[in-house]
Image: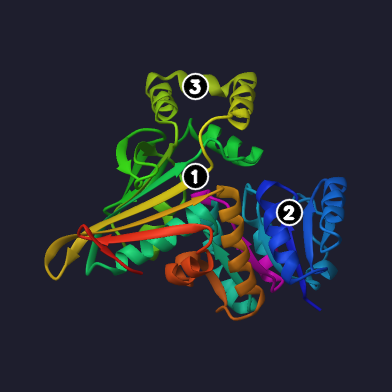
């Protein structure tokens, strides 16, 4: 019987929180999977057996007899290609992905027909960014008759605890140039360029943010049919954010290609003891309403980005596991609404919205 929930990377920073959330509702059916069985077993003991251990090597094929037991896979790791996901979908196993690489998510989207045929559901862009940012963008876009552009801004607190994989992804992408679709044409953008100052509310105030390769700006132009979407990142320490931007513009960022310097940068980010664990997401949609220029804004403020990511993923995973979702491959904004997610996160976040400067409600 297909009843197991396998969380790949389930003993990692976000995966642990996700497993604990799901383990409370489905004790004994949730498996923390990864190559290090000892870590998985240790984590299982910490949960009192509500979460079980599983050794899983992504480079090795999963036995057909195993697929027959797995109902849902939640992926917390980055993957080099979509081969493993394809095997999952072909087996009729549901799939939820919290990764943020646009190129990979575009590959998985091509499995839509296979998912419909195998009667499985795959939900992509799940978590904080992408995830909540997608839902906020979708809500803001619906407040306009015509949406011409969407600006997404993300502020992360340096006092939060960040998993090593997330820090490595951030450091590595300080080096990156990435492509975005603007007015139906591809444009190459450099990380930590094109800065702007964004007001994140009374507590956090105005912070500088810079372009960063989150996948939402690559997928939303297709799912929401918006000509231009941009995503920017900043930290609660404005001086550090500006230093990183200067580091990029000066060309010194190439030093991160040196292994020991990259390793030191990752370690430094993980050991930073400053700032808060605040998280703020702001979406600004510009366009037309009733023939006039109009702006719709949405601000979400919370704490502990890992916990928020895991909470969103757990809610999506629960909905998929229940079998209430349509078959196929979808991004989160295609099957979920901000209002329902906000209601379930009301203890963790506050959400404010404005239409042309006037406060509104969701």
Q: Count residues near mark 1 (Cα–Cα under 10 Å), then give few for <14, some for 14-19, many for 20+.
A: many
Element class at badge 2: loop
Q: Is residue 313 left or right of residue 125?
A: right
Q: Which residue is mark 3?
A: 254
Q: Which residue is mark 1?
A: 278
Q: Position of residue 29 (x, y in %)?
A: 80, 69
Q: Is residue 220 above or below residue 154?
A: below
Mark 2–mark 3 Cα distance, whole angstroms, equals 33 Å
- Residue 51 shows in this picture: yes
Point 32% across, 35% down: residue: 195
Q: Is residue 154 left or right of residue 270?
A: left
Which is more N-terminal, label 3 or label 2?
2
Point 31% across, 42% down: residue: 198
Q: Is residue 259 above or below residue 211?
A: above
- Write down the region rendered in magenta: 87-103
Residue 88 in the magenta stretch? The answer is: yes
Q: Position of residue 38 (x, y in %)?
A: 88, 46
Q: Which residue is mark 2?
A: 10
The image quarter containing residue 98 is: bottom right
- Colour treatment of the image: rainbow
Residue with the most extreme left position:
291
Disc 1 + disc 3, Cβ < 8 Å: no
Q: Count residues near mark 3 (Cα–Cα under 10 Å), then give few for <14, some for 14-19, many for 20+.
A: few
The image quarter containing residue 350 is: bottom left
Element class at badge 1: strand
Q: Position of residue 64 (x, y in %)?
A: 81, 68
Q: Is residue 86 left or right of residue 34?
A: left
Query: In the picture, which quadrant includes the C terminus?
Result: bottom left
Element class at badge 3: helix
């Amino acid at each position: 019987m297909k009843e197991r929930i396998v969380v790949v990377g389930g003993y990692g920073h976000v995966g642990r929180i996700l497993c604990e959330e799901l383990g409370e509702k489905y004790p004994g059916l949730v498996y923390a999977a990864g190559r290090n069985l000892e870590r998985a077993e240790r984590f299982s003991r910490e949960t009192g057996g509500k979460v079980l251990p599983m050794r899983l090597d992504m480079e090795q094929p999963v036995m057909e007899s195993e697929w027959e037991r797995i109902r849902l896979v939640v992926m917390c790791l980055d993957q080099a290609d979509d081969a493993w996901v394809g095997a999952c979908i072909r087996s009729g196993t549901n799939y939820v992905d919290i990764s943020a690489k646009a190129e990979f998510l575009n590959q998985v989207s091509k499995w839509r027909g296979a998912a419909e045929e195998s009667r499985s559901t795959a939900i992509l862009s799940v978590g904080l960014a992408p995830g909540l940012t997608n839902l906020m963008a979708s809500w803001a876009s619906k407040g306009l008759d015509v949406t011409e552009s969407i600006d997404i801004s993300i502020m992360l607190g340096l006092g939060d605890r960040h998993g090593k994989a997330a820090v490595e992804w951030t450091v590595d992408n300080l080096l990156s140039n990435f492509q975005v679709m603007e007015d139906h044409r591809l444009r190459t953008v450099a990380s930590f360029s094109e800065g702007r100052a964004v007001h994140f509310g009374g507590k956090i105030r105005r912070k500088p943010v810079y372009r960063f390769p989150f996948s939402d700006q690559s997928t939303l132009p297709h799912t929401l049919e918006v000509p231009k979407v941009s995503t920017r990142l900043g930290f609660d320490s404005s001086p550090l954010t500006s230093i990183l931007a200067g580091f990029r513009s000066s060309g010194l960022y190439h030093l991160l290609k040196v292994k020991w310097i990259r390793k030191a940068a990752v370690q430094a980010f993980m050991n930073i003891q400053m700032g808060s664990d605040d998280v703020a997401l702001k979406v600004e949609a510009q366009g037309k309403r009733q023939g006039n220029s109009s702006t719709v804004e949405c601000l979400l403020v919370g704490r502990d980005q890992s916990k928020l990511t895991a909470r969103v993923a757990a809610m999506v995973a629960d909905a998929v596991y229940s079998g209430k979702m349509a078959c196929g491959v979808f991004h989160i904004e295609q099957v979920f609404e901000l209002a329902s997610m906000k209601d379930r996160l009301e203890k963790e976040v506050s959400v404010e919205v404005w239409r042309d400067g006037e406060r509104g409600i969701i």
